[in-house]
Image: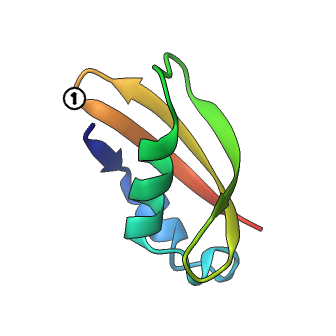
Amino acid sequence: MRVIITEHARKRLKDYRQDSITVADIISAASSVPGKIPTATRFRGFLAKSGRVFDLVAKDIPTGRLVITIIGK
C-alpha cells in the first residue's frame, strides 16, 4: 500500500514533541494498520525506532493511505 504524508505532517516532524520520529517510522506505522480507513481516524500508541511514542491520523484515498498529522507524546 502506498503511504502519502501531507506537508502538514512533514512540518510537524520538526516540532519538539515529534522529535526523533522519522518518515520511515510513519510509513511503517501507517502500513501496519489493517483494513480500510474510510474516514480520518486517530490511531494511538505507535513506537518510533528512537523509542518515542506517537499517534497518527490517517484515512484511505483512491491513491493510497493519507497520513494527515502526527502527534508525539
Residue depicted at x 39% and y 56%: 27
Q: How many marks?
A: 1
Kindly identify the amino acid type of the residue bearing the numbered disc 1.
Thr
Quadrant of the image occupied by residue 64: top left
Q: Is residue 63 above or below residue 9?
A: above
Q: Quadrant of the C terminus?
A: bottom right
Q: Position of residue 16 (x, y in %)?
A: 66, 83
Image side of residue 38 versus residue 41, left or right: left
**Camera-nearest residue between 36 and 68:** 36
Residue 5 lies, in percent from the top left, at 36, 52
Q: Quadrant of residue 47?
A: bottom right
Q: Position of residue 21 (x, y in %)?
A: 54, 75
Residue at the (49%, 16%) spot, across then down: 38
Left/right of residue 42 with respect to residue 26 in the rendered view: right
Q: Is residue 69 visible?
A: yes
For image coordinates 47% across by 29% down, the residue present is 59
Residue holding disc 1: 63
Q: Residues within 10 Å of mark 1 (few under 14, many from 20)?
A: few
Residue 53 is situated, as x and y percent measured from the top left of the image, at 71, 67
Extreme residue in the right direction:
73
Relative vertical location of residue 32 with respect to residue 64 in this rendering, above or below: below
Q: Quadrant of the N terminus?
A: top left
**Image point (62%, 74%), residue name:** 18
Q: Nearer the viewer, residue 7 or 3?
A: 3
The colour style of the image is: rainbow
Q: Secondary structure at mark 1?
A: loop
Q: From this viewpoint, is residue 8 visible?
A: no
Question: Which quadrant of the figure has residue 28?
Answer: bottom left
